[in-house]
Structures are given as structure tokens and as C-alpha cells.
Image (cartoon, grey):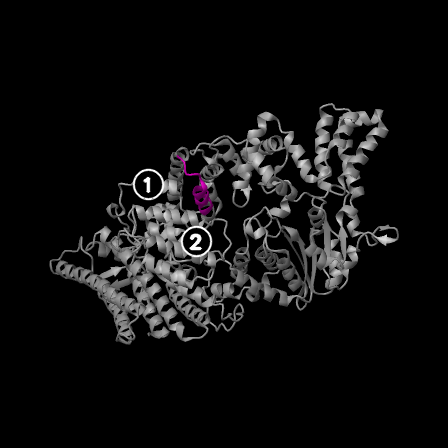
Amino acid sequence: MIDPMSALSIAAGVVQFVDFGKNLLSASYEIYRSPSGETSEEVELSTIAKDLTALITQIKDRAGKLPRGEAHNTAAQYQLVKISEECEEIFTQFQEALNQLEKRDSLSGREGKQKEHPKSRLKMARGSIRRALGSVWNAPKTDSMIKKLEKTKGRMMTATLLCLWDESKRSEQRDIKFSERLDDMIAMLRRLEERVDRTPRGPTNDPQSKSYNRSMLGVPETIRIHEELVDCLWNQQQRPGQRNWNEGEPEGRTGLSEKIKNSFQKAIVNSLVFETIQGREEAIPKAFERTYSWIFEREPGELDGKQLWSSFPDWLENCTDQPYWITGKPGSGKSTLMKYILQHRLLKPHLQKWAENFALLITSYYAWVAGSDLQKSCEGLVRTLLYQVLQLNPSLVPEVAPRRWSLFLTLRSITKMPPWQRWELEESFEVLLSKCGTTMRLALFIDGLDEFESPPLQVLELIQHINDRNGIKVCVASRQWTEFNDAFNLNPMLRMQELTTADMAHFVGVKFEGNRGFLELKTIFPAEAARLVGDVVRKSDGVFLWVSLVVKSLLEALTEGDGLVELQETVDQLPIDIAQLYDAILSRISSRNVTASSKLLVTFKAAVGPLSYLTLWLADEKQSLNCDINSLFSHARSGLVDIMKRRLDSKTRGILEISPDGTVNYLHRTARDWALQPSVWEGICSTLPEGFDPYLLLLRAETIRLPEKANLRSNSMGLSWDILNKSMWYASQVGDSPANASELVRVLNKMNSEASDIAAPYLQLEGTVMSLYWPSTQEATQGIRARGNTFLGLMSQFCVLPYLKVKLEPEQKANKLKPRKNCTSLLENAVFGYPGINDPSVSSSYRISSSQRLETVSFLLERGFSPKEVMLNGNAIINEVRKRREEERYSESREYWAEVEELLEMPGISGRPKDTNQIE
């Protein structure tokens, strides 16, 4: 294996040779500078030849000292030798050109001709050497030589990096060793660059200069370094040691500025963000004016000499190991109170008394059962807390996220990071907890323990684990479930339904007082008006949501001119139970809006993750596929928000609403629970028109939005793969019917076309499958080496059978279709799916059922695809399936692999040549 100094010395020689050659051919080169640094305004052709010879001799001597033999001849070393030989070839061409110039000069001197031929001694002027060589080489030849020199320099950089990386394997701390070698290389390049910049012609315009540390590891050939470094740093058995910012940097090394340090920290913090990280908090309504202020009263109210709740200010200020529990009935206002607390000006001063001289960090998490996976899981809680703490105190990043910090520090640039996995989150979280009580104090507010998808006992275990640490204070809110009552009933606490009577009376009074119709009636019938307000509050039984819904209904009736008697009858007839109240609301939807209401509710339920008002509008309106989404400017979108608010209000009577962040949600958890009752949902679906398919509508909407989503994101290849994966999952759920098939094919073809157009400018990597097919970037956006794929491959991966049936006609046998090499086959895509989606140990909203995947595999086998196909990893599909069945730990997956194996072993399954593993 080549030693690093030898690799760097060869690289230095090649860089000097290339820069010297490019200067000779530069149109702006006006002061001759020899490799030794001497400058001159005149130069002999023989001097140029001598300097070139000195440079190439230096390269040959250094390359000649490399160790020989198969044991030493690595791929990177082979490249170094090859590039050195290429430099000799370039030198030969320069030498021949200079010899021709010398010969012409000699002939012209003897013949007494002094015109039209260059002299052996050149008086330097801008581009004079280029013009002289131009009499031997034409312009295309000169430009071609410049490009060849640039390419040689780039390949030398890559080969040197690979040599340094391979050499670092000898060290136990490979990342640190490589980082040191990379610093050596950058320092060497910059010294050469500075030597060039001292010439009178000014600084170089070479695009590779000034940014060696940012560009050298971005070329395809160095992907291996990135991948192996990630494998090294993300080894669960070995945690990288903490690395200080400029630890051990000797003089001359490439020190990094505070600005770059901050950019590294910011990139790592932002990697924790998920799309809905603040969605739930924004959706929770603010407390109504002058309500909930009692929570910050030092002395709680009393009833029969007993405190109605535990003093919240006392709990905030005192050292206690007991979480504060906010509990209450569904809809009683727990989330609104939590938001009120977190936004109140008195919260921090109270907590600072507890924190004393320590830094105080206040964090929160709002669980939401109707939200994305990370909005309702312990993993989402941990991820959110890490994000908030590191955002508040970025200096903790190197200790809390040492793997990511080491990756950036090693490569000296912001690069792709692996997705956060549960084990890494837990590892970072433990480090964060260990800091509490020593360098900081943490106040944590968690709303909706009952909203977690995880079992209550698992959530409680995490809460207890956090609360057991020093320097942490926890406040939680939940419904009065048995598990939570058992855990917190002896803690400081409050029950919402016992404390909000005055708040609700204030709310009803202010709302009614703002209605002209009520004021007119109150003037004439003051006692009856007061009784109406009191009855609404009493009948609510402490459920603030019930009051809000009833008041909204009564205000509409007042606006329509109903009298107090009619209003009182309405209140008397309303059910106390919140679910029955939703039934009453649904029954009031006009007959002409019933179908529209059902379509909206069913489309909302079918959506994966947060559903934007714009996506729902596109789906509900069934906009043309050619709709130019980017033409909808901000003022137009604002108008669409108003349109959708009005539509949801009238068609669903407010059961669905638009949150401040623009996503559509149930107005409350109780509305979701009610709607998903089998009897209720069956009634909603019974009014849908025949053939209605919400998944097809959502697929259309996401396809129309694809150009917009690409503009909003700066991720790899310009494509938003979260949107593409979601869209293809929608396609997989579309009903397999003749009516749907033609429209499905049309929409998917449009999606393929749009994605191709978006990715085209980014796919410039010549000689790779990525330069041809945008589907090959699916895994590259996750920091994984790209795997060749096609659009039909993606359709097989997501088991979109209606599309495959149209595209793979029965007469088109697989062995008759044109193959594509280096691509994942349709059968491999169908059998194994996208990594993670088919794994029951990984939570995924895009999982395809085993039955649907087996049906797709069966279909492809019928079309002639063979189980003996060779996968990209070199294994036959049938052998890989057997291997996974034997190694599988989960019974569900083991059963799937067994069924696939049975399908692949069915008699009559034909084989195909190994290299025909993909089609056009």
C-alpha cells in the first residue's frame, strides 16, 4: 500500500504540471513564471521545453518510487501510475509542438524571413504563448488540450484521496487519520495555489481552486470513501470519541472558521426536523381571552376547605421529582391549557428560580394520534426534544451527535448523512440527559400521552426514565386512563372539568354579546338570556369543546332570527355526550351536500401524513393534469385557503378544519374517534358515488404538485422522494378496475414525465445509470449508493398491478423485451420492495400488504420473468429469498418469504439469461 507522503508528492507534481500547461495555453497569461517561481517578460522556447521536462521528470521519479507487485498495487495506486503516464503523453505533445516552432524559427532565420513565423525568443504579452502554439495547433486542438489537463488534475485528486483513504485503514481511529491526511492534501494544494496567485496576472480562475475541501469528495469515484466512512462511524459497537473543533491542528493545517463550524452545527440540528414537527402545536387553538389565567395563581381555589388543584407556580419553582399531571375529560381543554402555559410570560421566570444559575432550556412535544408516525411515537418525542435542545444550545452538537460531527469534521464539508435510526436517537438522547443537572436544566412539557400509538405503559416507562435524571422537570397532560391515573394520581395535578366553569361562562357570554340578534333579545328578555348562557355551561359537564360547538350552532340560529324559546329548545334537545353531538351535527348537513361531505371525509382519511389544503382542493376539484401549479401565486393561494375553509365548514359542518400551518385536520381528537366508529364510517361511505376512489384523486393531486414540491426543496436531483414514494403508494391502493386503469396509466405517465423533466438538469454523471433514469436516485437521496432502476421497476416495487398489466401485455414475454443492464429487475423490485417498507420492524406508512406483493410476483412470473435472475448484488433471486427466510426473525416476514419461495419454485417457471434483467 502506498504511503501518504508519496501519494501527496505525486499529486503535487501533477498539479504543478497541469497548472503550468494550462498557463501556457491561457489567453490571459502575460508574465512567464517558471516552476521554480522566477518571472520574466521574455522567454526562450527552449526554456519552456526545459521547464516542462523538469516537471515531467519530477513526476516520473516520484511515480517510479512506488512499491510494485500485486500486494501493493491497489486500484488507487494503479490510477496514480496511469495518470503519471498520461502526463508524459501530454508532455510529448507539448515537446513536439515546441520543436516545430524551433524548427520554423531556424528556417526563417536562414532565409532572412522575419514575418509570419514566431521567434525562438518570445516577448511576453497577453496570450502570446497560446498564439505561438496556435500556429502549430488549431483552436479546437488547444481547447481540447486544456480540457484534457483539467480532467487529468481532477482524476489525480480523486486517486490521491482514495490512496489516503485506503492508507487510513491501518489506524483504529480511521476518521481522524483520514481527516489529518486530507488536511495535509488541502494545505499542499493551497500552497501551490498561492504560488500561482502571486503572479502579476492575478488570481486563478480555475473552478477547482479555492474550494478543494468542498468539491473533491463530491465526484462519483469518491462515493466509496463516503460510504465506508459512514459504515465506520455508524458502527453501533463503537462510539466515536469526541473531537474538538481545531483539536491538534498544527500550523499550516486548514483551520476552519467559526462560520463553517456554525454551518455544520446547523446542518446536524436540521437533520432532526421532520415535516410535521410543529404541526400539532400550531393546530391547537389559543386560549380564549381572559381564560386559564388561574393556572399561574399562587394560591389555588378551594371547595369545602380543600384545594381544587395543586399550585402550578410552586411546582415550577421547587425541586421535585414528581411530574405535574394535567388531566381531564376528552375535549375539556388540556391541549389548549398546555399551549397557554408554554406561551405565557411568567413561565420562564418561575422556572428560572428552580434552575438557579444553570442554563434553562424549555422544550415541548404535542402528541397527535391522527398525525404522522413521528407525531405519535416515543421516537418522535425523542427526536423533537433533541431538535429543540440542540437548536437552543448548538454547542452540544459534537457531544450529542458525535457520529455526524465526525463525518463533517473528517470531510471538512456538509455532506449527506444517513437517516436517523432509533438506536442513534436513543444514544444521543442518553448523552443529552446526562448533561442535565451538570451544565443545564431542562423543563419538558408533553401533551397527549393518550395520543401515542405506543402502549401507555411504554410511554410511561420513557417518561419515568427521563424524570429519573437530575436537573429535569416534566409536565404531562392526558385523559384519565387507568394507566395514567395509577402512575400520577399522587402527583401534583389538576382536573380540567372541575376548573373551567367560569372560563366557559366567560366564553359563552362574550360570544353571545358579539351577536346583534342576541343583544336585541337580551334587552327585552334579560332573565331568559342569562338562563340560556347558564344552561349551555351546565350542560357541557366541563367539556369546553362541547360548549364551543353548541355556541357556534346557536350563533348561526341567532343570525337566522331564531328567538330565545327556540334557542332554549335547541339546547335542551342537544345530547350531552360529545359523540352524539357529532351525530347531530352530521344530520344537519343539507341533503345536497351529503355526498360532497362524504367525499371530503373519505379523501381526508385516505391521505398519508399531513394533508395540505391545496392537495385536498386539487383532489376535490379534480383539476386537469396540465394545471400549472406554479402559476398560483401567494395571493391566489390565500384565496384558496378561504375557499377551502368555507367548503369544509359548510360540507362537513366544521368536523374538518384547516390548521394555521395549512394542513387539514379533524377539529379535535373526539371528532376522529367518532368518525372512525364502524357504524358512523359505514354511514359516511354509503353516500359515496359508485366508483369513487380517493387514492386516484390524491395521486392526481400530488402529481400536479410535483413541480411545485421540487421548487420548494433543495434535496438531491431536485426530486422530492417523500412525495414520490407517497404518490406511488397511492397508486398501489387504487382499485383494480377497467374504469380506473386508463386514468391511472395516464396519471402515472404524467408523473414519470414530470419527474424526468425535474431531474434532467441534475443527472450529469456520464457513464452511470443515473445519467439515464431518474428512478435510480431513489436511494441516493438517503446517502446510499444509487441502484439502477426504471419507472416500471418502481411500479413493481409498489405493486401497481393495473399499470403493469397495461404495460406488460400477455404477448410481450419478458425474454422478448429489450434488456437494461445494471438495473434492478422488475421481479427483484416486486419481491423485495423498497428497503424498510417491507420490514415489519420498521414503521412505514407505505407498506404494501404481503398478499398484494405476492399477487404482483405471481403476475411477473406469468409474464416470463425468472426466479434465476441475477440481482445487482450477484445472487439469484431464488437463492436470496431462501437466505432471507432462514435468517428472518419475525414470523410475519418468515411466512412471506416462504410463500414467495413456493411461488418461485412452481413448475413451469421459465428461466432467462442472466444479463437480461431489465426492460425499457
Q: Quick one: which residue is furthest to the right in this view?
A: 305
- Residue 131 horizontal/vertical position (percent): 24, 54
Q: Is residue 296 above or below residue 754?
A: below
Q: Quick one: which residue is furthest to the left in this view?
A: 111
- Residue 856 horizontal/vertical position (percent): 37, 47
In reply to whether residue 727 is colored magenta, the answer given is yes
- Main secondary structure found in the magenta portion: helix
- Residue 314 horizontal/vertical position (percent): 79, 58
Q: Nearer the viewer, mark 1 or mark 2?
A: 1
Q: Which residue is mark 1?
A: 807
Q: Secondary structure at mark 2?
A: helix
Q: Which amino acid type is shown beneath numbered disc 1?
A: Lys
> Magenta stretch?
724-737
Q: Which residue is mark 2?
A: 781
Taking 523 as reference, is 252 left or right?
left
- Of the two numbered discs 1 and 2 on the same chain, state the one appearing first in sequence: 2
Q: Is residue 762 visible?
A: no
